[in-house]
Image: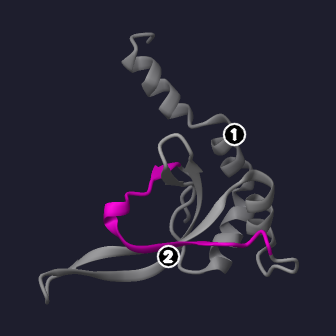
Amino acid sequence: MQRPPHKLLIDPDELFASRDIRIQDRRESQYPQLMRLCADFNFSVLQLQRKIFSHLTRKMVPGALEFVLAVHDDSTHYWYSMTPSMVSLKMLNDYAKRYEVDILHLHLFGDDDEELNHFQERGFY
Protein backbone atom coordinates (compact mmCIF):
# COMPACT_ATOMS: atom_id res chain seq x y z
CA MET A 1 0.00 0.00 0.00
CA GLN A 2 1.30 3.42 -0.94
CA ARG A 3 1.74 6.18 1.61
CA PRO A 4 -0.22 9.41 1.24
CA PRO A 5 1.72 12.52 0.20
CA HIS A 6 3.88 14.28 2.75
CA LYS A 7 6.32 17.17 2.55
CA LEU A 8 9.89 16.11 3.27
CA LEU A 9 13.16 18.03 3.00
CA ILE A 10 15.57 16.64 0.40
CA ASP A 11 18.96 16.75 2.10
CA PRO A 12 21.66 17.45 -0.51
CA ASP A 13 24.27 15.75 1.70
CA GLU A 14 22.45 12.43 1.17
CA LEU A 15 22.67 12.65 -2.63
CA PHE A 16 25.30 11.68 -5.14
CA ALA A 17 23.40 13.37 -7.94
CA SER A 18 20.10 14.98 -8.82
CA ARG A 19 18.54 16.63 -11.83
CA ASP A 20 15.35 18.43 -12.68
CA ILE A 21 13.44 16.69 -15.47
CA ARG A 22 11.69 19.26 -17.67
CA ILE A 23 8.25 17.87 -18.36
CA GLN A 24 6.30 21.08 -18.96
CA ASP A 25 7.99 21.74 -22.33
CA ARG A 26 6.70 18.61 -24.02
CA ARG A 27 3.53 18.97 -26.04
CA GLU A 28 2.66 15.28 -26.21
CA SER A 29 3.81 14.02 -22.85
CA GLN A 30 3.62 10.38 -21.81
CA TYR A 31 3.01 11.64 -18.28
CA PRO A 32 0.04 14.03 -18.48
CA GLN A 33 -0.52 14.25 -14.72
CA LEU A 34 3.08 15.23 -14.03
CA MET A 35 3.06 17.68 -16.95
CA ARG A 36 -0.09 19.36 -15.62
CA LEU A 37 1.23 19.66 -12.05
CA CYS A 38 4.55 21.07 -13.26
CA ALA A 39 3.04 23.52 -15.72
CA ASP A 40 0.07 24.71 -13.66
CA PHE A 41 1.35 24.54 -10.08
CA ASN A 42 5.13 25.02 -10.37
CA PHE A 43 6.12 21.52 -9.25
CA SER A 44 9.28 19.83 -10.51
CA VAL A 45 10.11 16.20 -11.14
CA LEU A 46 13.51 15.37 -9.69
CA GLN A 47 15.63 12.35 -10.51
CA LEU A 48 17.69 11.50 -7.43
CA GLN A 49 20.55 9.15 -6.75
CA ARG A 50 21.12 8.75 -3.03
CA LYS A 51 24.30 7.73 -1.25
CA ILE A 52 24.24 4.32 0.41
CA PHE A 53 26.90 2.72 2.57
CA SER A 54 28.54 -0.40 1.15
CA HIS A 55 29.76 -2.86 3.76
CA LEU A 56 31.97 -4.50 1.14
CA THR A 57 33.99 -1.42 0.23
CA ARG A 58 33.31 0.51 3.46
CA LYS A 59 32.48 3.56 1.35
CA MET A 60 29.44 5.46 0.20
CA VAL A 61 28.27 4.26 -3.22
CA PRO A 62 25.50 5.48 -5.53
CA GLY A 63 22.07 3.97 -5.00
CA ALA A 64 19.36 3.27 -7.55
CA LEU A 65 17.72 6.12 -9.43
CA GLU A 66 14.44 7.37 -8.01
CA PHE A 67 11.91 10.03 -8.95
CA VAL A 68 9.94 12.46 -6.75
CA LEU A 69 7.53 15.29 -7.31
CA ALA A 70 9.10 18.27 -5.55
CA VAL A 71 8.78 21.99 -4.86
CA HIS A 72 11.57 24.52 -4.45
CA ASP A 73 11.45 27.00 -1.58
CA ASP A 74 12.88 30.24 -2.95
CA SER A 75 13.49 31.74 0.50
CA THR A 76 15.64 28.86 1.81
CA HIS A 77 16.75 27.43 -1.55
CA TYR A 78 15.86 23.91 -0.38
CA TRP A 79 13.92 21.26 -2.26
CA TYR A 80 11.01 19.44 -0.63
CA SER A 81 9.61 16.18 -1.95
CA MET A 82 5.82 16.01 -1.98
CA THR A 83 5.64 12.32 -2.84
CA PRO A 84 7.46 9.16 -1.83
CA SER A 85 10.29 8.07 -4.11
CA MET A 86 9.26 6.02 -7.14
CA VAL A 87 11.42 3.84 -9.37
CA SER A 88 9.91 5.10 -12.63
CA LEU A 89 8.20 8.15 -14.07
CA LYS A 90 5.16 6.03 -14.91
CA MET A 91 4.76 5.01 -11.27
CA LEU A 92 5.17 8.64 -10.19
CA ASN A 93 2.56 9.74 -12.74
CA ASP A 94 0.13 7.08 -11.49
CA TYR A 95 0.75 8.12 -7.88
CA ALA A 96 0.20 11.80 -8.74
CA LYS A 97 -3.05 10.92 -10.50
CA ARG A 98 -4.31 8.92 -7.51
CA TYR A 99 -3.31 11.49 -4.86
CA GLU A 100 -3.69 14.73 -6.87
CA VAL A 101 -6.12 16.37 -4.41
CA ASP A 102 -3.93 15.51 -1.40
CA ILE A 103 -0.76 16.76 -3.13
CA LEU A 104 -2.38 20.06 -4.08
CA HIS A 105 -3.90 20.51 -0.62
CA LEU A 106 -0.49 19.92 0.97
CA HIS A 107 1.16 22.34 -1.47
CA LEU A 108 -1.42 25.12 -1.24
CA PHE A 109 -2.50 24.91 2.41
CA GLY A 110 0.40 23.15 4.15
CA ASP A 111 0.51 20.22 6.50
CA ASP A 112 -1.99 20.29 9.37
CA ASP A 113 0.50 18.57 11.71
CA GLU A 114 3.20 21.10 10.82
CA GLU A 115 0.91 24.01 11.72
CA LEU A 116 -0.17 22.34 14.96
CA ASN A 117 3.46 21.78 15.97
CA HIS A 118 4.24 25.43 15.16
CA PHE A 119 1.40 26.67 17.38
CA GLN A 120 2.36 24.29 20.19
CA GLU A 121 5.95 25.61 20.12
CA ARG A 122 4.61 29.17 20.47
CA GLY A 123 2.47 28.18 23.48
CA PHE A 124 -0.97 28.58 21.86
CA TYR A 125 -2.02 24.99 22.71
Tag of residue 108: 1
Tag of residue 66: 2
In the figure, residue 27 lies in which quadrant? bottom right
Decide which of 23, 3 is in the foreground and name it: 23
Decide which of 19, 119 is in the foreground and name it: 19
Question: Residue at image x 16%, y 81%?
Answer: 59
Q: At which x and y percent is residue 105? A: 69, 42
Task: Give, as a single range, the part of the protein colored magenta.
Answer: 7-25
SS at mark 1?
Answer: helix
Residue at the far right in the pictured view: 27
Q: At which x and y percent is residue 58? A: 12, 82
SS at mark 2?
Answer: strand
Q: At which x and y percent is residue 117? A: 43, 26
Answer whether residue 18 is magenta in the image: yes
In the figure, residue 54 lies in which quadrant? bottom left
Query: Is 95 above or below relative to 87?
Result: above
How crowded is the residue under tag 2: few (<14 C-alpha within 10 Å), some, or many (20+)? some
Residue type for callout 1 = Leu
How crowded is the residue under tag 1: few (<14 C-alpha within 10 Å), some, or many (20+)? few
Residue at the far bottom in the pictured view: 56
Q: Is residue 37 left or right of residue 11?
A: right
* Number of numbered labels in the structure image: 2
Query: Is 117 above or below relative to 42?
Result: above
Residue type for callout 2 = Glu
Confirm or deny contact between disc 2 and disc 1 (CB under 8 A): no
Mark 2 / mark 1, whichever is N-terminal = 2
